[in-house]
């Protein structure tokens, strides 16, 4: 079995954790070995960076600093977790990846995409996700769900306009790369969301 790299994307509160469980169960049923992970995070250094970037104590962090920290965590993650798991033939299921850097630091914070592309090339070389599942729902729905959870982190504290821009940015990425990025309507009831996901998994993943 060759490795396969799946990433999950979407604004806060669209149901990424539920999707992660659903996809993981499906892969296990098909007999695939999987590695579940997340960004920023997935390694000791990455989790330390995650704590730093999500901490409200760092409000007003310079956008470039934020971007570089995301890619610093990613470099560690690729080297220690993602590449070894793919090499071992596993399916890597990662909660967020580089599309989030384009959507949040690029469109959200205003960093030009070509500067992000330099870091992408530097850190990933030619590695890209094989499949990206983008959960899409109106910002109002996502934020209402996210509000029910614990205290807001530094990103969750952003204004609705920020998330509208992030959502639009994700949809543009999906439009540009329809082969890799599959959009799921996350505003639908869970049963229907799962059905959409199932259809995608069955057509995109060789098991
Ligand atoms: P989450 O994984 O719990 O959704 O939170 C991680 C936060 O980090 C989320 O608000 C999006 C943000 N993020 C970026 O801004 N850029 C990135 O490259 C990544 C991976 C995450």
Image (cartoon, rainbow, N blue to C red):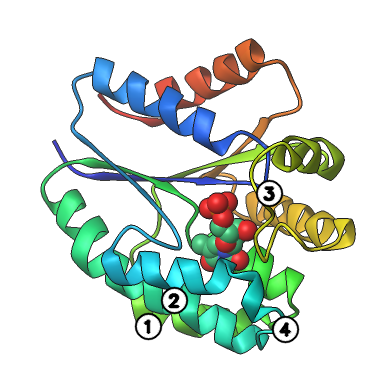
The span from disc 4 to disc 3 (Cα, nearest Å) is 21 Å
> Which one is earlier in the sequence, the residue at label 3 or at label 2?
3
The residue mark sitting in front, 1 or 3, is 3
Q: Is residue 5 left or right of residue 115?
A: left
Q: Is residue 137 above or below residue 158?
A: above
Q: Which residue is mark 1?
A: 122
Mark 3 Cα shell of 10 Å, populated few (<14), some (14-19), many (≥20): many
> Which one is earlier in the sequence, the residue at label 1 or at label 3?
3
Is mark 4 in CB contact (under 8 Å) with mark 1? no
Mark 1 Cα shell of 10 Å, populated few (<14), some (14-19), many (≥20): few
Residue 80 coordinates in the image, percent (x, y)? 20, 65
> Which one is earlier in the sequence, the residue at label 4 or at label 2?
4
The span from disc 3 to disc 2 (Cα, nearest Å) is 19 Å
Q: Is residue 118 left or right of residue 30?
A: right
The span from disc 2 to disc 1 (Cα, nearest Å) is 9 Å
- For label 1, the SS is helix
Closer to the camera in the image, 145 or 34: 145
Q: Which residue is mark 2?
A: 71
Residue 40 coordinates in the image, percent (x, y)? 45, 63
Is mark 2 in CB contact (under 8 Å) with mark 1? yes
For the residue with label 2, is its CB less than 8 Å from the closest atom of ligand 1?
yes
Residue 42 coordinates in the image, percent (x, y)? 33, 57
> Which one is earlier in the sequence, the residue at label 4 or at label 1?
4
For the residue with label 1, is its CB less than 8 Å from the closest atom of ligand 1?
no
The span from disc 1 to disc 3 (Cα, nearest Å) is 26 Å
The residue mark sitting in front, 4 or 2, is 4
Question: Dividing the picture into quarters, in which one does residue 140 lie?
Answer: top right
Q: Is residue 203 above or below residue 104?
A: above
Q: Which residue is mark 3?
A: 11
> Which one is earlier in the sequence, the residue at label 4 or at label 3?
3
Q: Is residue 194 above or below residue 84?
A: above
Residue 130 coordinates in the image, percent (x, y)? 39, 47
């Amino acid at each position: 079995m060759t490795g396969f790299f799946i990433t999950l994307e979407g604004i806060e509160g669209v149901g990424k954790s539920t999707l992660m469980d659903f996809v993981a169960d499906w892969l296990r049923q098909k007999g695939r070995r999987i590695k579940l992970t997340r960004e920023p995070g997935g390694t000791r250094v990455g989790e330390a960076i995650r704590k730093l970037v999500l901490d409200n104590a760092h409000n007003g962090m310079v956008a470039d600093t934020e971007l570089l920290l995301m890619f610093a965590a990613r470099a560690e993650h690729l080297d220690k977790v993602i590449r070894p798991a793919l090499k071992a033939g596993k399916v890597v299921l990662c909660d967020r990846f580089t599309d989030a850097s384009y959507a949040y630091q690029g469109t959200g914070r205003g960093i030009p995409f070509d500067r992000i592309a330099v870091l992408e090339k530097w850190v990933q070389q030619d590695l890209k996700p094989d499949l990206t599942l983008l959960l899409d729902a109106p910002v109002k729905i996502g934020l209402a769900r996210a509000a029910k959870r614990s205290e807001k982190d530094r990103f969750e504290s952003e204004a609705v306009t920020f998330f509208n821009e992030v959502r639009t940015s994700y949809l543009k990425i999906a439009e540009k790369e329809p082969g890799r990025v599959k959009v799921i309507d996350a505003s639908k009831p869970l049963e229907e969301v799962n059905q959409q996901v199932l259809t995608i998994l069955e057509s995109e993943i060789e098991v």
